[in-house]
Image: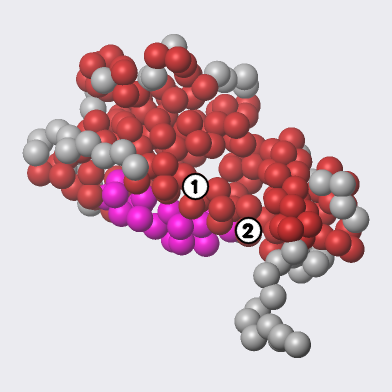
Amino acid sequence: MTTSTGARAPRSDALKNRAALLDAARAELNRDPDASLDAIAAAAGLSRRSVYGHFPSREALLAEIASLGASRVAAAVDAIHDADPVVDLALVGRLVWDDIEDVRAMTRAVVRGPMREQVLRGELGPLHARIVADVGLAAQTGAGRTDLPAETVAHLIEGAAFAVLDESLRRPMSRQEGRRLVVLAGLGVLGLSWRDAQAVLETHIDRLAPEEDR
């Protein structure tokens, strides 16, 4: 007779239920950021009791969703870099928008809610550091503003992106327009005129506005 000496692997149905729960939570929270745990469980085809087998509370479920989303954004942005800090900042804006565009309402609830600092200082910490580095390099090369500390400008660039997110929920906004506004707003905060920011978009259109989305 043999015995197991390691931790028991999760059952396949438990893994499927957890994945279904996370998918349902994303969809329901994007539809209604105040969606209850009962509504999320029903959308996943699970009972409220079974949900507690995976998450002890609605807050724990939201934290998991936010953490997974932030990790996905960070990985997408980390895969592409440019030596030009202005172009790199534009790419960061475009990539972040592309990743959150389908879950804008849920994303807004996270970045405007009590989990904001947890997410921004956690999985998105390296992304913030990259923005700070780009701002600093742009200032050194004369491509960006020098009147404010890089850390401050980075926070203002992030705030501009959040403002575009707010605007996209106030009125209908296509992916193309949202992407364009995020890039232009960020470069404007960096210190570029609207004409120069528009020129960056047009010069690097293949990277900042992929052909399939034009």
Asked which quadrant contains residue 197, the reply is top left
Q: Which quarter of the image is occupied by the C terminus?
A: top left
Q: Residues within 10 Å of mark 1 (few under 14, many from 20)?
A: some
Q: Secondary structure at mark 1?
A: helix
Residue 30: x and y, percent? 69, 38
Type of residue at label 2? Glu
Q: Secondary structure at mark 2?
A: helix
Residue positioned 30% across, 46% down in the render: 131
Residue 84: x and y, percent? 17, 35
Residue corresponding to mark 2: 64
- Give the vertical position of 168 relative to 214 (above or below): below
Asked which quadrant contains residue 60, the reply is bottom right
Asked which quadrant contains residue 96, the reply is top left
Name the outermost residue toward the left: 141
Asked if the residue at tag 1 contacts the one at tag 2, i.e. Cβ–Cβ closer than 8 Å, the answer is no
Q: Which mark is residue 72?
A: 1
Q: Is residue 161 visible?
A: no
Q: Which color scheme does this rendered protein use?
A: secondary structure
Q: Is residue 128 magenta?
A: yes
Residue positioned 15% across, 44% down in the render: 137
